[in-house]
Amino acid sequence: QVQLVESGGGLVQAGGSLRLSCAASGIIFSAANMGWHRQCPGKPRELVAYISHGGETNYLDSVKGRFTISRDNAKNTVYLQMNVLQAEDTAVYYCAADLPGRPTWDYWGQGTQVTVSS
């Protein structure tokens, strides 16, 4: 059974930082491309940060230079370090896994709320 469990969300003031974690089980984590997505109120879900199984990263333009995605294959965990948070970053953040031979982003976590107060 595949499980992705996010943690680390919360309420923070603008300019502050949060670190999200996503612990994976039931998958070969080292083979998975991992992504952090978010859904802002009234907007469609969007991919914020991506890290390939080989460690290559890519970011949404609006978070470049502020967010950093990383992974620890020994812990089956992917992280999202978010700095200089802005009110526009308020959203539910979801971790997702993209595995070889499976539909893209076939597995999702339950989401964690990030609220940035201005």
Image (tube, helix red, strand yellow):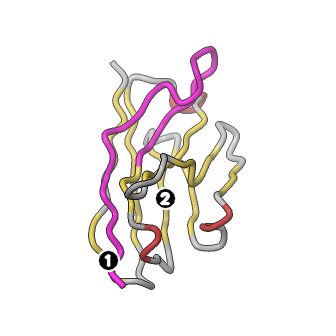
Task: Please state which amino acid type lies under the numbered disc 2.
Answer: Leu
Write the residue at 69% across / 51% down. Answer: 57
Q: Magenta segment, which residues?
A: 94-118
- Mark 1 or 2, which is nearer the eye? 1
Write the residue at 51% across / 33% down. Answer: 97
Task: Please state which amino acid type lies under the numbered disc 1.
Answer: Val
| Label 1 environment density (alpha carbons within 10 Å; few <14, some 14–19, many ≥20) | some
Instruction: Determine whether, in the image, residue 83 is placed left or right of residue 109.
Output: right
44 in relation to 107, above or below? below
The image shows residue 54 at horizontal and vertical percentages of 70, 40
Instruction: Determine whether, in the image, residue 57 is placed left or right of residue 2.
Output: right
* Residue 52 - label: none
The image shows residue 43 at horizontal and vertical percentages of 46, 53
Instruction: Determine whether, in the image, residue 47 is placed left or right of residue 117.
Output: right
Label 1 SS: strand
The image shows residue 86 at horizontal and vertical percentages of 46, 77
Write the residue at 60% across / 67% down. Answer: 63
The residue indicated by pointer 1 is 12
45 in relation to 31, above or below? below
Q: In terms of image quadrants, where is residue 9? A: bottom left
Lower position in the chain sequence, tag 1 or tag 2: 1
49 in relation to 90, above or below? above
The residue indicated by pointer 2 is 80
Write the residue at 65% across / 36% down. Answer: 53
Q: Quadrant of the N terminus?
A: top left
Q: Quadrant of the C terminus?
A: bottom left
Real-space Cα distance between discs 1 and 2?
A: 15 Å
Judged from this view, the residue extending furthest toward the left is: 11
